[in-house]
Image (cartoon, grey):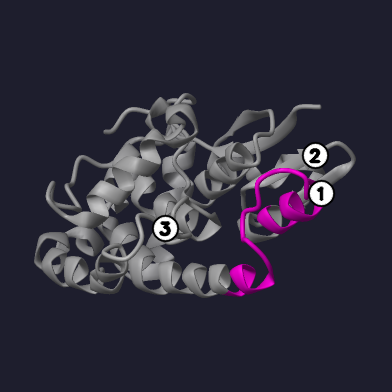
Amino acid sequence: MTILLYDLVGLDHERPFSPHCWKAAMALAHKGLDFRRVPTPFTAVPDIEGGVSKTIPVIRDGDNVVSDSFAIALHLENAYPDRPSLFGGKGGQAMARFIERWSQLTLHPYLGVAALCDIHARLAPEDQIYFRKSREQRYGKPLEEVSAPREQGLAAFRASLEPLRSMLTYHPFIGGKTPLYPDYVVFGAFQWVRIMSPFRILEDNDPVQHWFESLLDSHNGLGRSVAAA
């Protein structure tokens, strides 16, 4: 049975971009499960599966409807134990939760600001209205003012990646010899910007860029199925 993945899109429905939806897509691919993306703009999210969630990703797996990317990963791990593990055990689940928190508290604040206006430009008109209003309420200033200092913050952001960079000298992936769910968590953050913004986050010789390229190639090039902005 094909699993449905409700996937955030902008004006171009062939360019899913949500970092959280990419976590779910990579987790589904890791498990080797058939899935179909359901393109879902911001303003259509409240109508998904009878209003089950205010955010996506959401999946429908048979009779099961699951929202939240981490909950989806746990569902897949428990529902398909015979397929490759996303966590490698309970300890891996705990590690993945730490990586998720690190990603959302360290990576997302800068990346979201850096790509803010580029994301807005790629949305449908009705979604642009929602996006501008909600983000300007969040930041307390116009979108253009929020993302204006992205160049000044780039060096500090790159420096914040040093723990990941250092870890990659020991293993090719956060999961060790092969990627696990924590890799997909961090991958989703960089894929978000890659798809929606031409702003260059990583230098070509950065080990984090090499790691990212490896994940773009994984699962038959799923990450590269959407071209960079």
Q: What residue did someone put label 3 on?
A: 186
Report which quarter residue 128 is drawn in.
Answer: top left
Q: CB of mark 1 within 8 Å of CB of mark 3? A: no
Using the rendered image of the protein, determine whether residue 97 is visible from the camera's viewpoint.
yes
Q: Dot 1, how many residues are within 10 Å of its Cα: few (below 14), some (14-19), or many (20+)?
A: few
Where residue 60 appears, as percent x and y from the top left, is 78, 39
Residue 90 within the magenta-colored segment of the rendering: yes
In the image: residue 227, left or right of residue 63: left
Of the residues shown, which amino acid type is indicated by label 2?
A: Asp
Q: Nearer the viewer, residue 31 or 197?
A: 31
Tell me the element at label 1: helix
Task: Judge depth for marks 1 and 3 and give the one in front.
Answer: 1
Instruction: First in sequence, mark 3 or 2: give its number.
Output: 2
Disc 1 versus disc 2: distance between alpha carbons?
A: 10 Å
Where residue 75 appears, as percent x and y from the top left, is 76, 54
Q: What residue did someone put label 1 on?
A: 79
For the point 49% across and 26% down, the residue is: 13
In the image: residue 142, left or right of residue 81: left
Of the residues shown, which amino acid type is indicated by label 1?
A: Ala
Instruction: First in sequence, mark 1 or 3: give its number.
Output: 1
Where residue 227 appears, as percent x and y from the top left, is 33, 28
Q: What residue did someone put label 2 on?
A: 61
The N terminus lies in which quarter of the figure?
A: top right
Of the residues shown, which amino acid type is indicated by label 3?
A: Val
Instruction: First in sequence, mark 1 or 2: give its number.
Output: 2
Give the answer, above or below, for where 20 lies relative to 160: above
Span highlighted in magenta in the image: 73-94
Using the rendered image of the protein, determine whether residue 53 is visible from the camera's viewpoint.
no
Q: Dot 2, how many residues are within 10 Å of its Cα: few (below 14), some (14-19), or many (20+)?
A: some
Residue 225 within the magenta-colored segment of the rendering: no
